[in-house]
Image: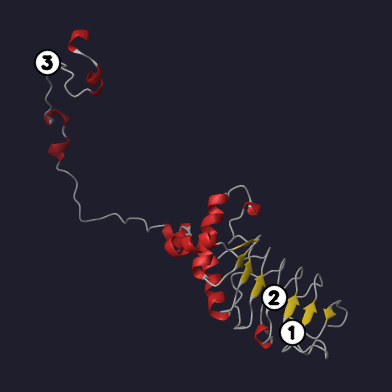
């Protein structure tokens, strides 16, 4: 980690705003014992991969705010993780992320996704409202029932009860792309034959014209419910 400013103790590593593109490893600094690190803050970098995270066997808190973590990133198994902060990254597929976290971080208690497209908070734009964010919270709590803190607030008992009852119905279903929805053009069928010429003769057309007498009684009129006979 030559030329990079960082703070390193026996159990903590802080290296923010240093344009890192990957996680630090034991070969970057001889004093870095990745197996002993419990707290790691790598916010405000350019990290787009989590390769090597499995080497931090004692890691409990991982801060990756303002990086380049996208849906393509796979979370290695890190069973000791209890806190993950991924604010302001490039995550849009919420189901994929929650599936990875549920499988790779079974002890997760604190999660923050503010500033990602997967988190429909009003910070992301005026297209989202409180109802969108409420549905998002219930669905995340349903998928990760062990969470105690989500984004900026504590998970309440009411939210947990609602997640158990209706959480699975709050999943956001994205519409198919235009390419997927597009249907092949209908091919012209060749087994049809044109109408006989006689049917196309205007002189042979038969139509019926007439007149009938219609007397309005108002029997089916809804307005007549309020009209008495003496008012007619």
User: In this rendering, would 95 be left or right of 13?
Assistant: left
Q: In this view, does 1 lie above or below 69?
A: below
13 or 116, which lies in front?
13
Counting residues from the start of the chain, the first of labels 1 and 2 encountered is 1
Contact check, label 1 and label 2, Cβ < 8 Å: no
Q: In which quarter of the image is the N terminus?
A: bottom right
- Quadrant position of residue 84: bottom right
User: In this rendering, would 94 be left or right of 88?
Assistant: left
Say few, some or many: other residues with alpha carbon within 10 Å of mark 2 (under 14 / 14 to 19 / 20 or more).
many
Q: In this view, does 205 lie above or below 77?
A: above
Q: Determine whether the residue tagged by mark 2 lies in a helix, strand or loop.
A: strand
Which colour style is shown? secondary structure
Residue at screen point 68% across, 73% down: 48
Spatial separation of the CA atoms under disc 1 and disc 2: 10 Å
Residue to which mark 3 is pinned: 213
Q: Name the spot of residue 123 as percent of width and height, x first.
A: 66, 53
- Can you see residue 7? yes
Residue to which mark 1 is pinned: 37
- Can you see residue 171? no
Residue at screen point 62% across, 66% down: 149
- Quadrant position of residue 169: bottom left
Of all residues, the one furthest to the right in this rendering is 3
Say few, some or many: other residues with alpha carbon within 10 Å of mark 1 (under 14 / 14 to 19 / 20 or more).
many
Residue to which mark 2 is pinned: 62
User: In this rendering, would 36 be left or right of 97?
Assistant: right
Q: Quadrant of the C terminus?
A: top left
Counting residues from the start of the chain, the first of labels 2 and 3 encountered is 2
Q: Is residue 228 above or below residue 42?
A: above
Q: Name the spot of residue 118 as percent of width and height, x first.
A: 58, 62
């Amino acid at each position: 980690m030559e030329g990079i400013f960082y703070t390193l103790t026996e159990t903590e590593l802080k290296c923010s705003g240093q344009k890192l593109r990957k996680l630090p490893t034991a070969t970057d600094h001889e004093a870095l014992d990745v197996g002993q690190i419990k707290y790691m803050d790598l916010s405000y970098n350019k990290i787009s991969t989590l390769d090597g995270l499995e080497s931090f066997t004692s890691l409990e808190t991982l801060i990756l705010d303002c990086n380049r973590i996208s849906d393509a990133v796979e979370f290695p198994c890190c069973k000791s993780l209890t806190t993950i902060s991924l604010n302001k990254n490039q995550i849009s597929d919420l189901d994929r992320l929650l599936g990875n976290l549920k499988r790779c971080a079974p002890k997760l208690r604190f999660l923050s996704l503010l500033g990602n497209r997967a988190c429909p908070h009003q910070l992301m734009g005026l297209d989202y409202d409180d109802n969108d964010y409420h549905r998002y919270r219930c669905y995340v709590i349903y998928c990760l029932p062990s969470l105690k803190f989500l984004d900026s607030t504590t998970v309440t008992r009411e939210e947990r009860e609602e997640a158990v009852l209706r959480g699975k119905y709050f999943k956001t279903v994205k519409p198919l792309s235009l390419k997927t929805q597009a249907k092949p053009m209908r091919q012209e069928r060749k087994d049809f034959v044109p109408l006989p010429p006689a049917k196309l003769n205007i002189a042979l057309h038969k139509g019926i014209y007439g007149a009938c007498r219609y007397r309005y009684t108002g029997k089916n009129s809804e307005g007549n419910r309020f009209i008495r006979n003496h008012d007619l």
